[in-house]
Image (spheres, helix red, strand yellow):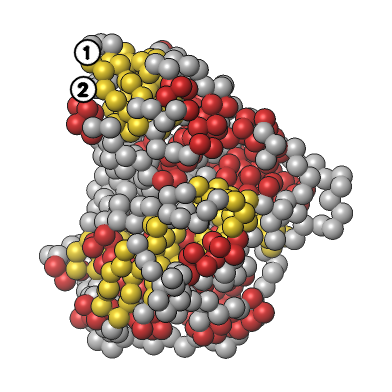
């Protein structure tokens, strides 16, 4: 039976388990990446494990999220990560070097290898034929410490691309179109594997835009084959030695297959407040724009930004529009400085930001009240941009650049000839923002400033658990809803006690007080609870506040893993309608939970306030159960020979 590319890579790296969808397997981790927002926790966890050396071929620690230094907090965190990287043998990327995924794609990603990263857009490197999975921070710490990663063998969804892209249509429109078709839940449980003639028309950075937003489909990851286009990219990056050709077998069997005709796609936009709320740009009435932000790990490649520069050359940004541009890497910024494109952008009236995540994470550039903001980013959840009542539309760089001139959301295909971007034979590559670990690391210590507080550690699971329903949420609650990550809070990513004051702050004002008053309790959730990001703060902060279990209709994959790692039970209603029987402040109880978990029994949830009992299911592996019994992954790793 022919194999998918995904299963070929998993097979090559398999350490334990049988490769069959749904089975728990462990695989060798070749590379890891962290960014600073999740990285401080990862390196605190690595410290707590007491290891000497990492076991991966290559690990990189990027500083790209929280680069503003309005107080000592961020700078302290950077110094902590830098010192931990040196101690453990990790490459450190200084602030200003670029966005982790763009940089990793340019400098380190290798076709056929496995990368895990403590960021949900780690799948970006799938554009280069690398199996690249976003994971919880603790999984990444263990990946470095033990060189292995546990996951459920995924199903594989094949998207065959046929046809040719229309003028002014680019990779962003392709993935927005796929999101419209499949929705934010369409990829759950799957690796999305691209194939077909249409793949040949997409550059590596186009492919990376598509795999990047596979995270928005809820997919485990997305991957493209490694072919002549991949080789060409690696040659231009001076990394030809990293190339290996990789593709599926001709008779590969897939769990699901769809065909997308590229010629059906036109410029698309995801309307507020979800990446799958997608329509054709031409379907919307004239919408006046206040702000446009171009960049992020989705659309900040050399080609993306050169297209923007060519569109804006000799033109003027509309007087009512604030246009901000953040390049994906310092290499790209240098190339655009050298070839004059940067001057064209500045002359048109663009505001040039440093090569970091910036506005994507609400790190500066929050739009004005009730603003309409067009962004080339991957997420438009309410409030993520830093302004609660702003409306964010996700678009391609072409749509963003043309709209910057007109002042209205504009279909770029009405704008005349499409610019053509020549890719330089050799990309500029400098290493001056990277710090490689020293050879002799025997006497190095990590530096912990006052902003770095120990992370919470759970207790072993009790036989019976009980308490109040602290909060009942609706469907599609995001990790940003659970633990907001705006510019004000980001400096405290290594300070859980401070963060806890804002937990669930987008939904209720007083969750922290409720949790303190009732000494913890439960959260009741709807469908797809915890969608959006790998940020384990969305599990660690509820753990700190004493949340014992989240009972939902369904969970997003990474957040569920993070809850288990924190020792918080993620339980689902056997009958989703039972969700209606629970309200905030009800007294609830789960009896004999350890026995039910160990024997794979239905779990009884009693609502003492309403005198009703319903049945719950735990969907996880035997190993997950052991982790929960230990009170989280760190306890489990410390207590078990691994
Ligand atoms: Fe950064 Fe936004 Fe990507 S925060 S890693 S640019 S999703």
Residue 621, position in %: x, y? 48, 39
Mark number, residue 610 = 1
Q: Nearer the viewer, residue 2 or 179?
A: 2
Q: x, y percentage for residue 284?
A: 14, 65
Residue at 79% over, 45% down: 52
How many marks on residues? Answer: 2
Drawn side of residue 63 relative to residue 443, left or right: left
Q: Determine whether label 1 and label 2 are within 8 Å by CB.
A: yes
Residue drawn at 23 percent across, 11 percent down: 611
> Is residue 427 at all visible to an observer of this figure?
no
Rendered view: 548 above or below 104: above
**Helix, strand or loop for disc 1:** loop
Q: Position of residue 385 (x, y in %)?
A: 37, 50
Does residue 595 show up? Answer: yes
Return the residue at label 2: 581
Quadrant containing the C terminus is: top right
Label 2 residue near ligand 1, CB within 8 Å: no
Outermost front residue: 1
Task: Please tell me whether mark 2 sits on a helix, a strand or a loop.
Answer: helix
Mark 1, Cα crowd under 10 Å, few <14 / some 14-19 / many 20+, is few
């Amino acid at each position: 039976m022919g194999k998918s590319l995904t299963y070929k890579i998993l097979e090559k790296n398999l350490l334990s388990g049988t490769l069959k969808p749904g089975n728990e397997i462990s695989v060798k981790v070749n590379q890891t990446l962290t960014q600073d927002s999740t990285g401080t926790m990862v390196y605190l966890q690595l410290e707590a494990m007491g290891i000497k050396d990492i076991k991966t071929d290559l690990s990189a620690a990027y500083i790209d999220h929280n680069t503003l230094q309005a107080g000592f907090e961020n700078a302290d965190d950077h110094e902590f990560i830098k010192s931990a990287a040196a101690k453990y043998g990790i490459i450190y990327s200084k602030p200003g070097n670029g966005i982790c995924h763009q940089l990793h794609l340019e400098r380190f990603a290798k076709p056929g290898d496995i990368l895990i990263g403590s960021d949900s857009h780690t799948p970006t490197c799938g554009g280069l034929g690398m199996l690249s999975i976003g994971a919880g921070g603790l999984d990444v710490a263990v990946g470095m410490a033990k060189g292995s990663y546990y996951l459920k063998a995924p199903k594989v969804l094949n998207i065959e691309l046929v046809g040719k892209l229309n003028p002014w249509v680019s990779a962003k429109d392709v993935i927005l179109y796929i999101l419209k078709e499949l929705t934010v839940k369409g990829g759950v449980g799957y690796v999305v594997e691209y194939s077909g003639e249409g793949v040949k028309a997409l550059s590596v950075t186009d492919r990376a835009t598509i795999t990047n937003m596979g995270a928005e489909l809820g997919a485990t990851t997305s991957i493209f084959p490694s072919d002549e286009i991949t080789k060409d990219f690696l040659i231009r990056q001076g990394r030809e030695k990293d190339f290996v050709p990789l593709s599926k077998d001709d008779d590969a069997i897939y769990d699901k297959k769809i065909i997308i005709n590229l010629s059906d796609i036109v410029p698309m936009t995801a309307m507020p407040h979800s990446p799958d709320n997608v329509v054709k740009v031409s379907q919307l009435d004239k919408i006046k724009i206040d702000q446009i932000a171009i960049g992020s790990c989705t659309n900040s490649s050399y080609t993306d930004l050169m297209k923007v520069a060519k569109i804006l050359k000799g033109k003027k940004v509309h007087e009512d529009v604030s246009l901000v541009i953040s390049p994906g890497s310092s290499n790209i910024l240098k190339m655009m400085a050298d070839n004059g494109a940067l001057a064209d952008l500045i002359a048109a009236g663009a505001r040039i930001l440093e090569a970091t995540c910036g506005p994507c994470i609400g790190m500066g550039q929050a739009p004005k009240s009730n603003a309409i903001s067009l962004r080339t980013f991957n997420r438009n959840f309410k409030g993520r941009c830093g302004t609660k009542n702003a409306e964010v539309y996700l678009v391609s760089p072409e749509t963003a650049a043309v709209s910057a001139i007109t002042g209205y959301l504009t279909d770029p295909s009405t704008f005349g000839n499409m610019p053509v971007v020549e890719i330089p034979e050799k990309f500029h590559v400098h290493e001056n923002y990277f710090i490689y670990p020293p050879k002799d690391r025997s006497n190095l210590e990590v530096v912990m400033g006052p902003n770095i507080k120990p992370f919470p550690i759970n207790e072993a699971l009790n036989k019976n658990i009980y308490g109040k329903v602290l909060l009942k949420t609706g469907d599609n609650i995001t990790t940003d809803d659970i633990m907001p990550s705006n510019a004000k809070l980001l400096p405290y990513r290594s300070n859980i006690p401070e963060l806890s004051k804002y937990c669930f702050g987008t939904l209720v004002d007083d969750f922290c007080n409720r949790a303190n008053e009732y000494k913890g309790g439960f959260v009741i959730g709807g469908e797809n609870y915890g969608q959006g990001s790998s940020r384990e703060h969305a599990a660690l902060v509820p753990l700190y506040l004493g949340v014992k279990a989240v009972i939902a209709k369904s969970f997003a994959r990474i957040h569920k893993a993070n809850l288990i790692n924190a020792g918080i039970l993620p339980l689902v209603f056997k009958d989703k309608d039972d969700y209606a029987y629970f309200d905030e402040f009800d007294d609830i109880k789960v009896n004999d939970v350890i026995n039910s978990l160990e024997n794979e029994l239905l779990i009884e949830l009693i609502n003492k306030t309403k005198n009703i009992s319903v049945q719950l299911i735990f969907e996880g592996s035997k190993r997950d159960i052991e982790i929960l019994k230990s009170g989280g992954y760190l306890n489990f790793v410390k207590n078990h020979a691994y």
